[in-house]
Image (cartoon, grey):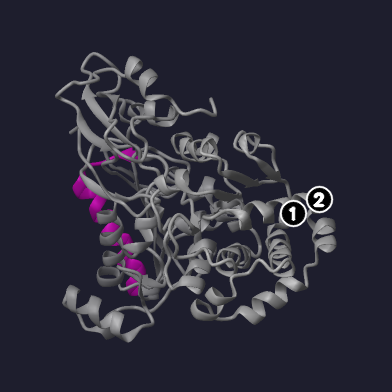
Amino acid sequence: MSATPVSTASAAAKAPGKGDDRAVDTHCPYCSLQCGMGLVPTPDRPSPVAVTERVAFPVNRGALCGKGRTAPALLAAGARLTVPLVRRTPGGPLEEADWDEALGRVAEGLSRTREQHGADAVGVFGGGGLTNEKAYLLGKFARLVLGTSQIDYNGRFCMSSAAAAGNKAFGLDRGLPFPLADVARTDCVILVGSNPAETMPPALRYFTDMRQRGGKLIVVDPRRTRTAEQADLHLAPRPGTDLALALGMLHLIVAEGRTDEEYIAERTTGWPAARAAAMAHWPELVERVTGVPLPQLREAVRYFCDAESAMVLTARGPEQQAKGTDTVGAWINLTLATGRAGRPLSGYGCLTGQGNGQGGREHGQKADQLPGYRSLTDPAARAHVAEVWGVDPDSLPGPGRSAYELLDALGRDVRSLLLLGSNPVVSAPRAAHVEERIRALDFLAVCDVVLSETARLADVVLPVAQWAEETGTMTNLEGRVLLRRRAVT
């Protein structure tokens, strides 16, 4: 895949149906950019629709990567589940069934577990690709109908470390606190553990535009990625040493007198402890630990501190480490110590991954949160949601297990599972162990658009509507709430 996103001109030349008044404005089903696109009918093709550009949408301005351009293949006949499947005998095959039988078996399986082992013996596992509406209803169904605390989603495997660090630093779990367009207008970006040239190509233009304006791009990545090749400075730490790298940079910022003392005094707390941690990571030590040469460390600090405006953006690289929350927190501290956070074209942001990783947890799929980021341990939050739902606050379960802990408990404390929009047999940490735990369940119901590896283990598989077949909203990495319209029945 080219590191350069498809240009508007080339997309226009290739896009079928450009200017077709039959086009339905919608969004790509893949990553958190949620690129705008149009869908036009194609009755003579295997897929029922084809993609056309949607230049007016500000995030991608018509550009699409290979995934977006080929997204209609997901809608092709033969790739989709269209009828429910049930396993009528233990160890037997999955067989087609009508909806009454399939739904009856799901209700029976979940109810039987509740009656025999209690409500928390039933688990619910969601996904970061679900619409906001599905995420909300899944959380409500788990807590009101099933009465279980055991609900979480695969977004835990994405940016949960950044969410925890953001909550600790700012009291807010948000991907980007500014639009991507601000990236093009800032003067320096430290991009940590992200490779947008390959993972979200339409976003790369913002970094390219920033550099063309004279801004500096610093990429932190052990690999020489296509994004790193375009950087003004590539820091390549040994895998797992990002925390030491961030602390080493903060050490230099302090030692060179580049902190914003007025900002620190007026707008932060905890600076003495953060400074002490940084001063314990002197440059020569950091060079030995990370493998990043000291001159490069000094150059990165100079770029970042000399810039009038500057950002630190993290992604899965630093977040999916043993000390992911501490690592992201250390990078956030660079923006606080230099007075960047909360100022125009500056601060910290996280590049979320899944299409609705942000909205999925905002609307109640997380084990410890009610809709709207409301904590399950906050009496006022519980009372508010209970009033909306028309129930007694005491009837709401407390916090449950987070995603991996929930999967690890399958077949033991959690005996039945309702799973929607996830494939943990492939995507979960220790996937072979997770498959073993799933096989130990008394009952498994999977809702998906295809017969995934996890669905093949289920007692009941329910086909569900997906992108382009349903209308719903998604929350992209900027916090935009976007309307994905139905184009196909």
Q: Is residue 105 magenta?
A: yes
Can I make out residue 264 in this image?
Answer: yes
> Dot 1 surroundings within 10 Å: few (below 14), some, or many (20 or more)?
many
Q: Which residue is mark 1?
A: 297
Q: Amino acid at mark 2?
A: Pro
- What residue is shown with label 2? 293
Q: Is 475 displayed left or right of 425 in the figure?
A: left
How far across and down, in percent of the image, does residue 471 sit? 20, 44
SS under mark 1: helix
> Quick one: SS at disc 2?
loop
Q: Residue at x 45, y 67 (%)?
A: 414
Q: Please provide the residue range marked out in magenta.
A: 95-116
Q: Is residue 70 visible?
A: no
> What's the residue at 29%, 39% (across, down)?
467
In x, y percent, where is residue 162?
52, 62
Please name the residue shown 19% across and 32% down the image.
24
In the rendered image, the vertical position of residue 226 relative to residue 120, given as above or below: above
**1 or 470: nearer the viewer:** 1
* Quarter-of-image position of residue 255: bottom right
Question: Whole-percent x and y of residue 58?
Answer: 32, 40
Amino acid type of the residue tagged 1 in the rendering = Leu
Q: Position of residue 390 (x, y in %)?
A: 16, 77
